[in-house]
Image (cartoon, rainbow, N blue to C red):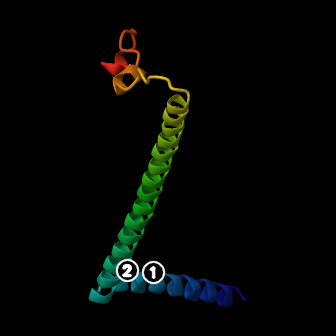
Amino acid sequence: MRRLFWLGVGLAVGALVARQISKAVHAYSPAGLAETARNSAAGLVDSVQDFSGRALQWVTDFVADVREGMAEREAEIREAFLNGQMLTDLDPMDAYDLDSDDEKYR
């Protein structure tokens, strides 16, 4: 019974070792190298598509923010025009407090 047990263990270990060797041989064969290159290229394409999707979302969000700001400013101008007021804040730099101690505007 012991001999049969050790024969089974030997066959199992031999099968596992043979499988690992065949995987290594396939990985370094021309077909295996081509498969690795193909998978790498597919991963690169997926990464580029993911980045371009995020960049497109950023641009879309930016455009929406600009349009929202434009609509607010147009409403202010329209209200001032209807009330007969003069617009004194036409200089866009007036929106920033340049006299502050905050260094991010300098």
Q: Residue 48's spot in the image, x, y percent?
A: 37, 65
- Name which residue type carries label 2: Ala
Relative depth, front residue between 37 and 1: 37
Callouts 1 and 2 close, C-beta under 8 Å: yes
Classify 10 Å Cα crowding around label 1: few (below 14), some (14-19), many (20 and above): few
Does residue 28 show up?
A: no
Classed neighbour count for the residue bearing mark 2: other residues with Cα under 10 Å, few (<14), some (14–19), many (≥20): few
The quarter of the picture where residue 13 lies is bottom right
Amino acid type of the residue tagged 1 in the rendering: Gln
Residue that badge 1 annotates = 20
Vertical side of 68 occupied by 36: above or below: below
Residue 44, can we see it? yes
Residue where numbered disc 2 is placed: 24
Q: Could you tell me which residue is drawn at 30 percent across and 84 percent down?
A: 34
Judging from the image, what secondary structure is the residue with disc 2 in? Answer: helix
Residue 10 image point, x, y percent = 56, 85
Quadrant where the C terminus sits is top left
